[in-house]
Amino acid sequence: MSTGQVSSLLAPVVALNIWTFVMEGWMYQARIPVYSKLNIKNTITKRELDAMTPASVRWKGDNYNHLMEQPTQFYAIALVLALAGKDDKIDILLAWSYVAVRIVHSLVQSTSNHIMSRFSIFVVSSGILAVMTGRAALLVF
């Protein structure tokens, strides 16, 4: 990356953030109609609300929460690689692969929520992130 040029690793970071907003919108689109029909009191607990909410609606919120978890590591590692000027083809491919796998994970969790499929997809995304982390570690240590 030359001076003044934007790292190609920033595009997958922004793409995953955009996807997170898409999931947030989907979550609200699913929750608002259900919640507006429920007689929700101020003293209701999350567990009580979850018991009144259809599983297919909860899945979208669960996935949105998941996008606030492991992907934060992705953002940090991608930014380390970008700041280090390490945006070679391998790192860019890994970053886009991570984003693609996380989108697939979101779609599986938010539609069928098949646990073993979700787990397999999560393992793949974790593997990609581990490789990216290893590559960043080689740069900074």
Image: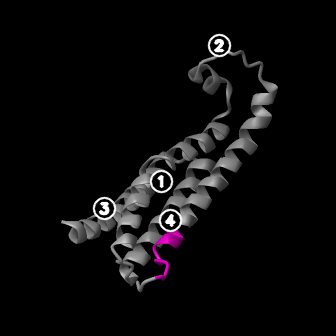
Q: Where, quadrant-wise, is the N terminus in this rendering?
A: bottom left
Question: Quick one: quadrant of the C terminus?
Answer: bottom left
**Residue of label 2:** 43
Residue with the most extreme left position: 141
Q: For the residues marked 1 and 3, what is the alpha-carbon distance in whole angstroms?
A: 20 Å
**Magenta-drawn stretch contains 30:** no
Looking at the image, tell me whether mark 1 or mark 2 is earlier in sequence order.
2
Three-letter amino acid code at the position of disc 4: Val
Residue marked by disc 4: 13
The local secondary structure at tag 1 comes to helix
Marks 1 and 3 in Cβ contact (< 8 Å) = no
**C-alpha span from label 3 to label 4:** 16 Å
Q: CA distance from mark 1 to mark 4?
A: 24 Å
The first of marks 1 and 4 along the sequence is 4
- Report the Cα–Cα distance between label 4 and label 2: 38 Å
- Look at mark 3 in the image and give the residue it sits on: 130
Query: Residue 48: which numbered mark, if any?
Result: none
The magenta-colored residue range is 4-12
Is 68 in front, or is 26? 68
Q: Nearer the viewer, mark 1 or mark 4?
A: 4
Q: Secondary structure at mark 2?
A: loop
41 with respect to 124 (left or right): right
Front: mark 3 or 4: 4
